[in-house]
């Protein structure tokens, strides 16, 4: 068997990478380690991955839940938290939108970042 290849990071598209990076910096507290108008990278805590944002001027917001005739979500991010309500408020204060449809009543919240990328916050063990 060959050696496993580690995931170095996730890259999201956005019309203005610095603005979306600022949102994730405020939400997650991750350090911005590389930045220009076309590419921004944030570094997570030890054991985490890197999150980068690249310029895509034609980015379209995905829908949640999905519909067949509009842009569908291609990926979503999951963040494990200890205080769901406080983290949800922190996300909304940073510019996130709580999605109308939630797949579960407890333990998990689905939100969208300012350009529409879906992410979930959830309580450990949920």
Image (tube, helix red, strand yellow):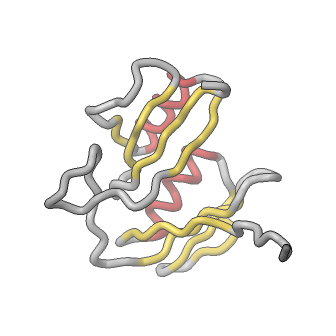
Q: Is residue 41 left or right of residue 38?
A: right
- In the rendered image, residue 58, in percent from the top left (x then y), is placed at 27, 77
Q: Is residue 33 left or right of residue 12?
A: right
Relative depth, front residue between 33 and 102: 102
Q: Residue furthest front?
A: 1
Relative depth, front residue between 83 and 62: 62
Q: Is residue 77 left or right of residue 96?
A: right
Point out the image quarter for the C terminus: top right
Q: Residue at x 34, y 40 (%)?
A: 97
- In the rendered image, residue 49, in percent from the top left (x then y), is placed at 70, 59
Q: Is residue 55 above or below residue 8?
A: below
Q: Residue furthest left?
A: 69
Q: Residue at x 14, y 60 (%)?
A: 69
Point out the image quarter for the N terminus: bottom right
Q: Residue at x 65, y 47 (%)?
A: 29
Q: Is residue 27 above or below residue 89?
A: below
- In the rendered image, residue 35, in percent from the top left (x then y), is placed at 59, 75
Relative depth, front residue between 70 and 14: 70
Q: Is residue 80 above or below residue 58?
A: above
Callout count: 0
Say which quarter of the image contains residue 19. Answer: bottom left
């Amino acid at each position: 068997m060959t050696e496993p290849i580690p995931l170095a990071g996730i890259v999201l598209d956005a019309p203005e990478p610095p603005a979306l990076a600022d949102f994730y910096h405020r939400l997650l507290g991750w350090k911005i380690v590389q930045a220009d108008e076309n590419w921004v990278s944030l570094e997570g805590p030890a054991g985490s991955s890197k999150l980068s944002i690249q310029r895509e001027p034609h980015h379209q917001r995905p829908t949640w839940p999905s519909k067949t005739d509009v842009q569908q979500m291609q990926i979503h991010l999951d963040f494990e938290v200890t205080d769901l309500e406080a983290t949800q408020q922190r996300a909304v204060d940073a510019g996130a939108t709580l999605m109308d449809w939630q797949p579960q009543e407890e333990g998990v919240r689905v939100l969208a970042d300012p350009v529409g990328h879906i992410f979930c916050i959830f309580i450990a063990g949920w």
